[in-house]
């Protein structure tokens, strides 16, 4: 999961600096948190520029998704990490509640994808039907194929 989080940052950094994806996936090494913090700081320095945020990422998710502004890519990567935050919390048996605004944003971002892309291999499993009266977080997680 750390490699996935690092990969998301590396993807943003590469598209923000070149318009194209990274040439390799970063390795977490002996200090996963240190590697993430370093890459986060490098990425934040790049995207602090409105011109960079408005630049175009060339087909970051393949030709079926097309090009998008780096700003949209950053937003999508945030939506990608929200369910993984829940995954970590569930695994660690700690508080799994996500910020309600993040839940709303994440659900909308994922629902905005074409179904064939969302359910394609390597993305999300089939949606789980939420229980009657499920809260917004549960509905979002169920939509993303997680049984809660």
Image: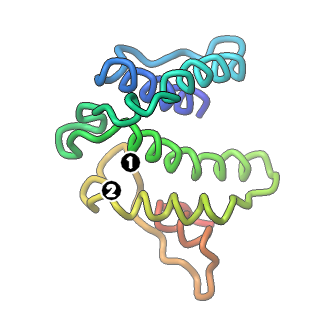
Q: Residues within 10 Å of mark 2 (few under 14, many from 20)?
A: some
* 47 vs 103: above or below: above
Q: Do the residues labelled 1 and 2 touch (CB within 8 Å)?
A: yes
| Residue 53, quarter of the rendered image | top left
Q: In front here: 43 or 98?
A: 43
Name above or below for residue 108 compared with residue 5.
below
Question: Is residue 80 found left or right of 148 in the rendered image?
Answer: left
Left or right: where does residue 17 sit relative to residue 57? Answer: right
Image quadrant in which the C terminus is located: bottom right
Q: Which residue lies furthest to the front in this view?
A: 50
Classify mark 1: helix, strand or loop. Answer: loop
Where does the image place residue 144, in percent across and percent down from the top left? 47, 60
Q: Which residue lies furthest to the left in this view?
A: 63
Q: What residue sits right under mark 1 in the picture?
A: 123
Q: In this view, does 80 lie to the left or right of 35?
A: left
Which residue in the protein does label 2 denote? 119
> Which residue lies at the image location 53% right of the left edge and 45% below the top edge?
78
How dense is the environment of label 1, judged by Cα within 10 Å: few (below 14), some, or many (20 and up)? few
Q: Position of residue 110 (x, y in %)?
A: 41, 58
Question: Which residue is at 74% across, 57% downward?
Answer: 96
Q: Which of 44 and 88 is in front in this view?
A: 44
Pinpoint residue 23: horizontal percent, then vertical percent.
Answer: 34, 14
Q: Residue at x 60, y 73 (%)?
A: 136
User: 131 or 102: nearer the eye?
Assistant: 102
Residue 16 position in % (x across, y down):
39, 25
Asked if residue 36 is positioned above or below residue 111 in the image, the reply reads above
């Amino acid at each position: 999961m750390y490699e996935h989080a690092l990969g998301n940052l590396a993807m943003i950094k590469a598209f923000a600096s070149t318009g194209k994806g990274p040439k390799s996936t970063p390795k977490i090494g002996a200090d996963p948190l240190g590697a993430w913090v370093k890459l986060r700081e490098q990425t934040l320095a790049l995207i602090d520029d409105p011109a960079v945020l408005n630049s175009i990422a060339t087909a970051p998710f393949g030709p079926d998704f097309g090009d998008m502004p780096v700003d949209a890519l950053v937003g999508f990567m945030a939506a990608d990490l929200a369910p993984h935050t829940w995954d970590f919390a569930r695994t660690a048996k700690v508080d799994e509640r996500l910020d309600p605004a993040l839940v709303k944003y994440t659900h909308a971002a994922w629902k905005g994808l074409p179904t064939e892309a969302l359910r394609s291999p390597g993305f999300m499993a089939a949606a789980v039907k939420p229980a009657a009266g499920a809260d917004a977080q549960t509905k979002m997680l169920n939509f993303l194929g997680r049984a809660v």
